Image (tube, grey):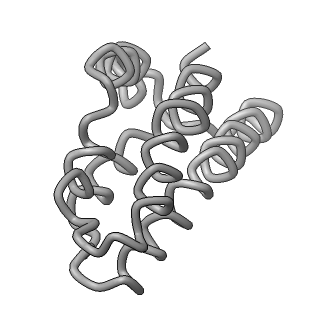
Amino acid sequence: QTDLALYARYLPVKTRENREFYRDFLKAISVQLSEVQLLLKQGLQENRTPPKVSLRGVVEQIRGMIDGGLVAFSDPIKDSFHVPDESEMKKECMDLISNNVREAFSTFAD
């Protein structure tokens, strides 16, 4: 869940190809969180879930990321789109963070 924020900080964004991958990563976050949620539900049904203690604090951590503006996702790219023709891609990434990523984490935390 929150490892996605850590992963975002380490993804390279130096080349256009890197930045396109980063955009695709942002698009996939909602799918990744939905899959984790489905696996947790399946684990509950099969009586195979992580110990409760291992999930303690996760919701609070997610809420903290959301309340903090999801900077773990926006910081890596805020100064990375130097080419004028990439302004649309930067806007798309920032919109994804503000909308899709925020909604995906919010839904997951609920």
Give 108 or 24, whichever is nearer the viewer: 24
Residue visible at 31% across and 24% down? 69
Residue visible at 35% across and 13% down? 60
Residue visible at 57% across and 50% down? 29
Give 83 or 69, whichever is nearer the viewer: 83
As drawn, 59 above or below 82 = above
Query: How far from the left and from the top, in percent, is residue 49?
Result: 60, 37
As drawn, 88 above or below 41 = below
- Based on the displayed image, in which of its 4 quarters is residue 53 positioned? top left
As drawn, 89 above or below 75 = below
Looking at the rendered structure, the number of numbered marks drawn on it comes to 0
Residue visible at 33% across and 13% down? 67
Query: How far from the left and from the top, in percent, is residue 15?
Result: 28, 85
Query: How far from the left and from the top, in percent, is residue 55?
Result: 42, 26
Position of residue 74 in the picture relative to residue 98 (left or right): left
As drawn, 15 above or below 2 = below
- Based on the displayed image, in which of its 4 quarters is residue 65 positioned? top left
Which quadrant holds the C terminus?
A: top right
Query: How far from the left and from the top, in percent, is residue 103?
Result: 60, 26
